[in-house]
Amino acid sequence: MSLTDKTILLIIGGGVAAYKALELSRRLMDKGARVRTVLTKGGAEFITPLSCASLTGEQCFTELFDLKDEAEMGHIRLSREADLVLVAPATADLMAKMAAGLANDLASTVLLATDKPVMVAPAMNAEMWAHPATQRNLKTLEADGIHRIEPGSGMLACGEFGPGRLAEVPDIVAAVEGFFSPHARPLAGKHIVVTAGPTYEAIDPVRYIANRSSGRQGFAIAGALAGLGARVSLIAGPVALDTPPGVERIDVESARDMAAAVDAALPADAAICVAAVADWRTDGCAEKKLKKSVDGLPNLTLTENPDILKGLAGRKDGRPTLVVGFAAETNDIVDHATAKRARKGCDWIVANDVSVGDDGAGVMGGDDNRVHIITDTGVESWEAMLKTQVAGRLAARIAEALA
Ligand code: CTP
């Protein structure tokens, strides 16, 4: 009963996912919480005040100017008697109001009046989520200290596919529990940028240069960091992987796209560059598909790509406190990686052995990874373990370093 003695004011916005708020209220109560609900006008189009009241055993509040509520409670008291104000689903509209400081209904007034921590679980159509206005509002809310439970990605109620799905109820409950148990979330309040996967460098509209990176190690690290409470921006090259829970994913294709996305995601407390960024791109992508019957053997000239890791490590302004690079090596691993650390100016290099061992461990794209962590104090060699285990250990080390 991790939420015993906690009162959660659940503000239910107007979205299809409002029905999940009913399940959420019960699961929070299972953990011992007292749950009070505020239902917006939009929310009441999807679920009723009666269902909220029946499930929570508490009056559900809907109207700002309901005199009875004002006399008995008042919106100020309502917001202050909670230990946490949780907005789920948080619609684009409600978050825009929060970002602008509007107070024109009970939910927005409570959110403006509260002196308690606020957590939002956004849910909306993928285009609305990606819209610059929503992204701008999210940044404002973050700067205002509002906690966010990242939406999931997948099939949305509107029939479209992409990010914007309300986080799963158990993930929201876990985020609330984690919020009240800071030891379980040593990275709460930290923002970490992770790059992962390969990059594709176009030769023409159908051909590209790529590499064998699966993205699995980077995705596992992003998930492990989010699990410790960090807000994680995962800049992902083309991979066939699900987004880890609680992680904000930005899909990119080329090294230059990745560099721009990393820049846009800053400021960050740490940057973990796991991506196998292509070192070179072709000098200009052909506008039309190259035809061997017409063009013959292509003459590909290569140009160097921006080095994202080196750029981050060398930033004069806004350098993340901890910059970590990865180095895939087949021989003289520690020597090469130590030289790479100095060359790139990063704080740590995680060298992974991509030579093929007897057991197959270390092959790029495999399940296992055998790593050496090179820092300013020396080298730490870890035994071969699953990529998810490497991710867990590394996330814990990062939490220590940022503490
Ligand atoms: N990296 C990057 N941007 C690039 C190239 C690499 O951010 N354009 C990062 C990778 O994410 C990784 C590290 O730098 O963290 C790998 O360094 P790199 O010099 O690319 O390694 P190798 O390709 O293994 O270098 P070398 O060919 O010299 O062994």
Image (cartoon, grey):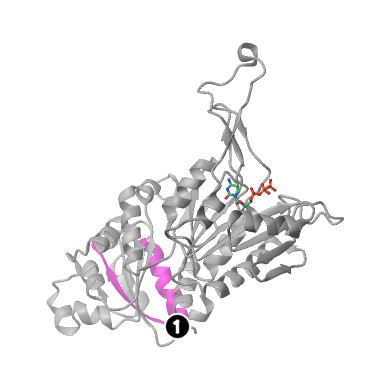
User: Type of residue at label 1?
Assistant: Leu
Give percent across and percent down for residue 11: 31, 69
Q: Is residue 355 magenta?
A: no
Give percent across and percent down for residue 347: 59, 63
Where are the magenta residues, as a range? 18-41
Is residue 237 placed above or below 299 in the rendered structure?
A: below
Residue behind label 1 places its C-beta within 8 angstroms of ligand 1: no
Is residue 231 placed above or below 154 in the rendered structure?
A: below
Front position in the image: 126 or 221: 221
Q: Residue 206's quadrant in the figure?
A: top right
Let me know if residue 299 appears in the view.
yes
Q: Residues within 10 Å of mark 1 (few under 14, many from 20)?
A: some
Question: Residue under circle 1?
Answer: 3
Residue that protrudes farthest toward the right in the picture:
358
Let me know if residue 154 appears in the view.
no
Disc tally is 1
